[in-house]
Image (spheres, rainbow, N blue to C red):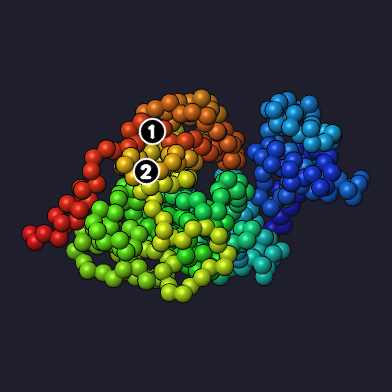
Amino acid sequence: MLLDESKFDLQLKLWALRIPSQLCKVASRILNGYLLDKPRVKPITEDPSCETNRYMILSERIQNPDLSDIPEDKLNELKVLCTIEVVPYLLTLGYSYWSAGHIAHLNITGELLPYKDVIAKVIYDKNYPRIKTIVNKVGSITNEFRVPKFEILVGKDDMVTEVKQYRATFKLDYSLVYWNSRLEHEHMRLVSQFRPGQIICDMFCGIGPFAIPAAQKGCLVYANDLNPDSIHYLKINANINKVDDNIWAYNMDARKFISQLMEVPVHEISPEPDVPVLKATEECSMQANGQTMPQNEGLTENGASDDAGVSGLGRKKDHKNKRTRGESSSNSKPWEHVDHVIMNLPASAIQFLGTELLSVTIAQYAFRGVIQRKYWKGSLPLIHCYCFMRANETKEMIISEAETAVNASIQDPILHRVRDVAPNKAMFCLSFRLPEEECFKEESPKGLLDSCVDKQAPE
């Protein structure tokens, strides 16, 4: 049976802007969110008619050559930069598949399912040895760790691979952890908003697509995931990318993670000034498990600190990370300040929160009454919450749902369209400053000491 490759061709009629090459970087910043966002397709390409210009390919959502789909303030900013020239652009896409390292991931369903083996064989023959394993997604993602089930159609049964995104390398077992190559642009878009030295809280970190680039930028990252395999590979990737000094890894429920992170440790209350950061919360967790465990002493795969639910990655003596420019993790006090909170769990919100629309509802519970006003410094963190929106839902509905969740009015929310995931379904990122209402607790942190004492008391 022969496969007609042309049947898989998809032609997109788009619009592009002709921009002088030296202005593309500034123009990209202005048009952030309005450029083409397709995997393995660069939104900036050569102008065939002029070597000194470039084409900036606009998003499929930009349907009119008058650019009326782009906000006026952005167009005015662009007009100050240069003369705007709009040209038609035809983009042809071939096979629709995604690869992660040596693995090509297919989503073959419906009428194409009887031909899955033929499709896989053609892709394998045309791309070997770069592609060595072809898998097809089976069913929908239903487990709590967001990991799809796959069947191997052709090639070797090896799901451990490495992928590269910009300056970072990620090792993963595709059968055990969640990975989506199509979110590369979104990872970089959000990380570009972080500054060296800032404290980042990643509540559903996976293997580190946000955490690793943020740490490379010099941020200190507190990263949590419920999937122990994700944390296992997060540690490996922190080591590979030489950012283990800038990442603290947690393996627990997200609510418990936030509560523990915001709790004032014992050494802030007792006269012992040299107790390591988060020692109090680690001790409480260890004692709760009924075990005596050593403190964090570096990157381990199945170390004692893992059993306690928290592991500090960069604790090796005399280890200096030349890439990072952020503050030392030993000086970090997350109960005093966190700059950004990432909440990337759009499809599983209903499991956590009892709502299908917005995973931001977790903020209602995770942050309610856990931040102590006495110790907090500066503004509350920026929340970056991912969600899905269907065709019959509106942006106003998402913002209203978020305001209901945090029980407060949200000031200056930013809703960014990440990508289309289906004909009538899109992924969005809602960013807003966490309101003060119900976030602060006023009581004395003495409760932490009491809880530790209680857990040490004999039964």
Q: Is residue 442 visible?
A: yes
Could you say which quadrant of the image residue 271 lies in? bottom left
* Picture quarter with the N terminus: bottom right
Q: Which mark is residue 436?
A: 1
Q: Is residue 217 toward the left or the right of residue 400 in the image?
A: right
Residue 238 pos. (x, y %): 50, 65
In the rendered view, would you say 12 is above or below 200?
Answer: above
Of the residues tagged 2 and 1, which is closer to the observer?
A: 2
Residue 18 pos. (x, y %): 83, 40
Could you say which quadrant of the image residue 71 lies in? top right
Tag 2: residue type?
Answer: Trp
Residue 82 pos. (x, y %): 82, 36
| Residue found 86% across the figure and 45% down from its top | 53
Q: Residue furthest left?
A: 459
Q: Is residue 69 toward the left or the right of residue 407 in the image?
A: right
- Of residues 244 and 228, the one nearer the viewer is 244
- Of residues 208 and 294, the one nearer the viewer is 294
Q: Which mark is residue 95?
A: none
In the rendered view, would you say 386 is above or below 228?
Answer: above
Secondary structure under the numbered disc 1 in the rendered image:
loop
Q: Is residue 285 visible?
A: no
Q: Is residue 376 toward the left or the right of residue 186 in the image?
A: left
| Residue found 47% across the figure and 50% down from its top | 200
| Residue found 43% across the figure and 60% down from its top | 329
Residue 56 pos. (x, y %): 77, 42
**Residue named by callout 2:** 376
* Picture quarter with the C terminus: bottom left
Secondary structure under the numbered disc 2 in the rendered image:
loop
